[in-house]
């Protein structure tokens, strides 16, 4: 009877060792996949941050472009003063205007490529 138990014990120990080894292989694979996942998450987060930065920059540029348009949109009064100045280049025409109005006229002259008036 002792002789029959020994092969069974050897078989059980062998199978246990095989399962233990197989579990180690699986655990190593799990660890490798975990590392790969962490790397992918880091890259994904980095790409998201880059896209967010690019969106922010584009929004800022859009805002600046709109602001530039606002600075070249002359009011009716500013248009009259601009045309009056454009006709004779008399600085007295600009007297009493707000600095922003004069700046807008300068930018408007640049926009219409009237470099002499500018």
Image: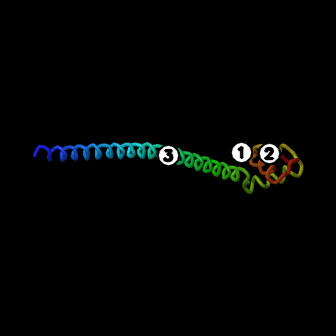
Where residue 103 sits, quadrant-wise, is top right
The residues bearing labels 1 and 2 have C-alpha atoms spaced at a distance of: 12 Å
Badge 1 element: helix
The residues bearing labels 2 and 3 have C-alpha atoms spaced at a distance of: 55 Å
Q: Measuring 68% from the left and 51% from the top, which residue is drawn there?
A: 65
Badge 3 element: helix
Residue 35: % across, % down: 43, 42
* Horizontal relation, residue 44 to residue 27: left or right: right
Badge 2 element: helix
Q: Measuring 88% from the left and 52% from the top, which residue is drawn there?
A: 87
* Horizontal relation, residue 40 to residue 14: left or right: right
Residue 108: % across, % down: 78, 51
Which residue is at the front of the view, 52 or 107?
A: 52
Which residue is at the front of the view, 86 or 47?
A: 47
Which residue is at the front of the view, 36 or 26?
A: 26
Q: Mark 1 vs mark 2: which is more N-terminal? A: 2
The residues bearing labels 1 and 3 have C-alpha atoms spaced at a distance of: 44 Å
Residue 27: % across, % down: 35, 44
Contact? badges 1 and 3 (CB < 8 Å): no
- Disc 1 vs disc 3: which is toward the camera? 3
> Which residue of the protein is positioned furthest toward the left in this rendering?
1
Q: Residues within 10 Å of mark 1 (few under 14, many from 20)?
A: few
**Residue identifier under label 1:** 100
Which residue is at the front of the view, 44 or 103?
A: 44
Q: Mark 2 vs mark 3: which is more N-terminal? A: 3
Residue 55: % across, % down: 58, 50
Q: Which mark is residue 69?
A: none
**Residue identifier under label 3:** 45
Q: Measuring 52% from the left and 48% from the top, which residue is drawn there?
A: 48
- Disc 1 vs disc 2: which is toward the camera? 1
**Residue identifier under label 2:** 94
Contact? badges 2 and 3 (CB < 8 Å): no
């Amino acid at each position: 009877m002792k002789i029959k138990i020994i092969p069974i014990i050897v078989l059980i120990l062998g199978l246990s060792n095989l399962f233990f080894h197989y579990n180690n292989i699986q655990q190593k694979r799990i660890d490798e996949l975990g590392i790969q996942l962490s790397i992918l998450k880091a890259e994904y987060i980095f790409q998201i941050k880059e896209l967010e930065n690019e969106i922010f920059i584009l929004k800022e540029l859009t805002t600046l472009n709109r602001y530039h348009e606002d600075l070249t949109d002359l009011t009716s009064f500013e248009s009259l003063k601009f045309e009056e100045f454009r006709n004779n280049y008399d600085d007295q025409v600009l007297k009493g205007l707000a600095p922003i109005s004069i700046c807008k006229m300068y930018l408007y002259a640049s926009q219409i490529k009237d470099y002499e008036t500018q």
